[in-house]
Image (spheres, helix red, strand yellow):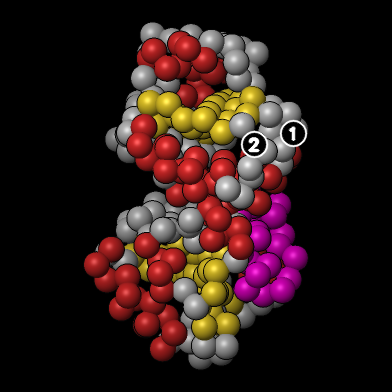
Amino acid sequence: METVRGTTSLVGLLGWPVSHSLSPNMHNAAFKQLGLDWAYVPFPVRPTDLPKALKGLMALNVKGVNVTVPHKQAVMRYMDEVSKAAQTIGAVNTIYLKEGKFVGYNTDSTGFLNSLIEAECHPKGLRVAVLGAGGAARAVVFALTWAEVDSVVVLNRTAERAAFLIDDLIDTFPGSTLHFAPLTESSVVALKDSFDLVINTTSVGMYPHVDDCLWPKNIPMPSTAAYCDLVYNPLETVFLARAKMAGAKTIDGLGMLIHQGAAALELWTGKTAPADVMRQACLAGLLNRPVRQ
């Protein structure tokens, strides 16, 4: 983004907070590469102000927005249309304002799958443990099940929330093996070596709380599994650092950020997203940010 004019098409990010996001960096770099008169701006919106914010977007003729925490599930009730995937997942992360209507999508699921494939981690047939049961976890479990993994167990500190996630998805994938358990030392020990991929879908370990890690301190991380963290600031969380020290394959969260953003950009503009340019913009943005307090 160089100059915003009266002709500039606006898109942005709804969340609270949004100051940490790299989405403006990568989308504006993509628009420049594509030669589009578009601009991407962050919109910090308190949860209580979400209905008013959405009305404002329509009034200002904003073309679309990404949606991040804490709005991904709450925003669904205000959509005029919701894609089948977003409806099943129970969360919207991309809105297209089309012909006076709010159309909700979830590009997190495809973004996550593309990030795994990019990292040469092909999910079909894998036994997966998912840490967390929020909106990101829902997209991840949907994507994994759609990609025909062998099984998924969702581990969450509040087991009831994990149970709700499984209940919401099992009807869509009736032949799948989906389980849940509380996230405790004993439940992790009980898994032993019965997983091939472990995914942290929570914000634990994200700046500024970079010393935090969901994996219990006293439990070794089997080197036979791969470990993925959706956090991208820092790129190497304590979770991934411990996995690397154990000799395991690690996948950071930057790939998912880029690929979900690329899918959103293509929905809004109809153009092929320049993923490499978006990645370089994100990496440059991370270099200019602190990763420790």
Q: Please tell me which residue is depicted at 55% across the width and 55% down the height of the picture.
A: 88
Question: Callout 1: helix, strand or loop?
Answer: loop
From the viewer's perspective, tell me whether residue 278 is left or right of residue 237.
right
Q: Please tell me which residue is depicted at 32% across the width and 75% down the height of the picture.
A: 51
Q: Quadrant of residue 245?
A: top right
Q: Which circle, 1 or 2, is nearer the viewer?
A: 2
Q: Quadrant of residue 197?
A: top right
Question: Callout 2: helix, strand or loop?
Answer: loop
Magenta portion: prevailing SS class: helix
Residue 127 seen in the current view: yes
Q: Which residues are magenta?
A: 255-281
Which amino acid lies under the numbered mark 2 shown in the image of this protein? Ser
Instruction: Tell me how far mark 1 sits from mark 2, CA to CA.
Output: 12 Å
Residue 261 is inside the magenta segment:
yes
Residue 176: numbered disc: 2
Which of 140 and 111 lies nearest the eye of the viewer?
A: 140
Residue 74, position in %: x, y?
Answer: 37, 62
Which amino acid lies under the numbered mark 1 shown in the image of this protein? Lys
- Asked if 155 appears above or below 141 in the picture, the reply is above
Query: Label 1 belongs to which residue?
Result: 124
Q: Earlier in the sequence, mark 1 or mark 2?
A: 1
Q: Residues within 10 Å of mark 2 (few under 14, many from 20)?
A: some
Q: Please tell me which residue is depicted at 65% across the width and 51% down the height of the picture.
A: 110
Which of 76 and 217 lies nearest the eye of the viewer?
A: 76
Residue 225: numbered disc: none
